[in-house]
Image (spheres, grey):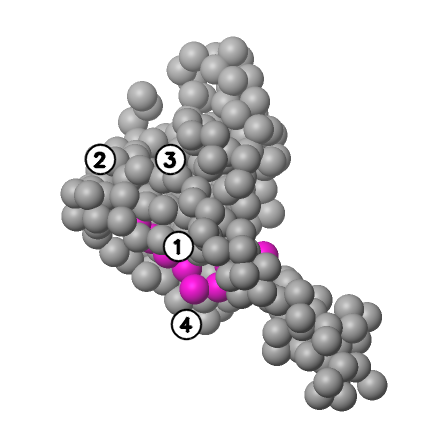
Amino acid sequence: MSRMDVIDYTIYGEDMQFVEIELDPGEASVAEAGGMMYMEDGIEMETVFGDGSNQGGSGFLGALMGAGKRLLTGESLFMTIFVNKGSGKKKVAFGAPYPGTIVPVNLSQVGGELISQKDSFLCAAKGVSVGIAFQKKLGAGFFGGEGFIMQRLQGDGLAFVHAGGKLHERVLAPGEILRVDTGCIVAFQPTVDYDIQFVGKIKSALFGGEGLFFATLRGPGKIWLQSLPLSRMANRIVGASKMAGGGGREEGSILGGIGGLLDGDNS
């Protein structure tokens, strides 16, 4: 495993946040393509194949494997490395893609590994490996909603993930179970057991608006949850548009359209 760069950072904003990273000469950070907000003179960008963690290490084959992993998660084959080539401290900033909270995670304090939703990763210190984590259980694979392929962040440096809406951190005791909407999971430690469970009641599944399945997280380990997944926010926007029928207050239920007719919202 390559050496991690130690970086300083400041997070600005409340609902619409961005993180400003301060790099010493020679230090670098890695981010998803298109995530950069601004950078000071002296910082140079370099687009790399995969996640950049194997640069100077296992060569082209390692980079090819890293890129293949990213392709499986639906991300771009390439990432961008920002290196301070100047003589003093320089700053580069990365903006959150939608309203929410930027979460700094020191991987050395969570066992060197973190499992996250594939679209939650924002940026990290150079050397952090961004791979894939397959869910071993068929239930999680076929009915997970957000997919059974998640991202695996490995290393001992800082990684930044983004949570939509309000962030909630919780530590599960051994054997403790928490049932969560699949889209509300941001990240969890690999010691947490993740599976998908059927709601159980047909009436609740069809008319409750919460979907047919939810995730079960079993401790021990730390979990990070978000109150507003991107998919939920997008559905609300589409449901509220006139082109989508006006969207009522019951857009999560199959009775939503009928409710809109009854309250005159479909005029």
**Label 2 neighbourhood size at 10 Å, few (<14), some (14-19), many (20+)?**
some
Q: In this view, does 105 lie to the left or right of 137?
A: left
Closer to us: mark 1 or mark 3?
A: 1
The x and y percentages for residue 180 are 39, 54
Q: What element carries label 1?
A: strand
Q: Mark 4 and mark 2: span between their CA atoms?
A: 29 Å
Find residue 111 and name its label: 2
User: Which amino acid, mark 4?
Assistant: Glu
User: Which amino acid, mark 2?
Assistant: Gly
Q: Is mark 4 on a helix, strand or loop?
A: loop
**Label 4 neighbourhood size at 10 Å, few (<14), some (14-19), many (20+)?**
few
Q: Which of 18 and 163 is in front in this view?
A: 163
The x and y percentages for residue 230 are 55, 58
Closer to us: mark 4 or mark 2?
A: 2
Residue at x 45% of width, y 71% of height = 15
User: Which amino acid, mark 1?
Assistant: Val
Q: Quadrant of residue 257?
A: bottom right
| Quarter of the image where the N terminus is located | top left
* Magenta range: 223-231
Q: Mark 4 and mark 3: span between their CA atoms?
A: 26 Å
Q: For mark 1, what is the residue?
A: 180
Is residue 90 in view?
A: no
**Label 1 neighbourhood size at 10 Å, few (<14), some (14-19), many (20+)?**
some
User: Upstream in the sequence, badge 2 or badge 1?
Assistant: 2
User: Which amino acid, mark 3?
Assistant: Leu
Q: For mark 3, what is the residue?
A: 153
Using the image, determine if residue 39 lies above or below residue 28: below
Q: For mark 4, what is the residue?
A: 14
